[in-house]
Amino acid sequence: KAGVTQTPRYLIKTRGQQVTLSCSPISGHRSVSWYQQTPGQGLQFLFEYFSETQRNKGNFPGRFSGRQFSNSRSEMNVSTLELGDSALYLCASSLMATSGANVLTFGAGSRLTVL
Amino acid sequence: GQQLNQSPQSMFIQEGEDVSMNCTSSSIFNTWLWYKQDPGEGPVLLIALYKAGELTSNGRLTAQFGITRKDSFLNISASIPSDVGIYFCAGLPGGNTPLVFGKGTRLSVIA
């Protein structure tokens, strides 16, 4: 059973550009969550999608957005990149929405560097 | 919002020693999870705890869901070099609220 797949694994952008990250959840999983990981702040919740609907959103500016497709694949977009957006972006999937006792399975992450 | 205080931040131990780390919060959680992250990888689930007072083992790892539902600990016995990594606690508050993570404990094992 394939795990959570994130692409690209590494990318470098410059300030002001925008970036799109992709996540393919485990087959059958309908919930996808995104987290930003930085050395100082740990894992910060970005948003969660379930059945193409955003269920939860973390405390991030509107430059961060996401969506989920009918096949449960998800993308997140960051526009007008800032230096502080440099981080590891982790996607995690679960069978049902995380309000139930369903644990998250993480992908390996997309490491974004903003120059 | 809910916050998890994870300690210690980092640990340096000798191979063969036992390790203990914990997470505390001022809020109640319905589920506690412990993850481990290796360099360049995403966190991997080690142990899930669903009931207050629950004590669960996974090989050399043992975790407990605190009776007050506001804390959890993870013990690793007889550490080995491959235990190196960052350990995260995570709590699920219940309701329509996402998983909350501690800031991690970085474990280094000296052979």
Image (spheres, helix red, strand yellow):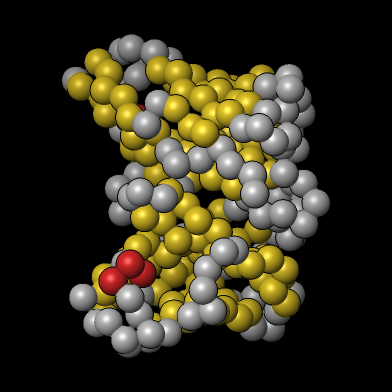
Task: Relative to B21, say whether A75 is above or below.
Answer: below
Task: Relative to B17, say whether A32 is above or below.
Answer: below
| Residue A26 x, y percent position in the rendering | 59, 64
Q: Residue at x 54, y 45 (%)?
A: B101
Q: Is residue A86 visible?
A: yes
Where's the C terminus of chain B, which quadrant? top left
Q: Which image quadrant for residue A51?
A: bottom right
| Residue A75 x, y percent position in the rendering | 52, 79
Q: Is residue B58 visible?
A: no
Task: Relative to A84, say whether A45 is above or below.
Answer: above
| Residue B37 x, y percent position in the rendering | 40, 44
Q: Residue at x 25, y 15 (%)?
A: B14
Taking depth in this image into account, of A42 and A6 the one nearest to the observer is A42
Task: Relative to A66, say whether A90 is above or below.
Answer: above
In the shown orientation, is residue A64 left or right of residue A87?
right
Q: Residue furthest right?
A: B95
| Residue B94 x, y percent position in the rendering | 77, 46
In the shown orientation, is residue A52 left or right of residue B34?
right
Q: Residue at x 72, y 28 (%)?
A: B69
Q: Residue at x 28, y 71 (%)?
A: A83
Number of dots carrying numbers:
0
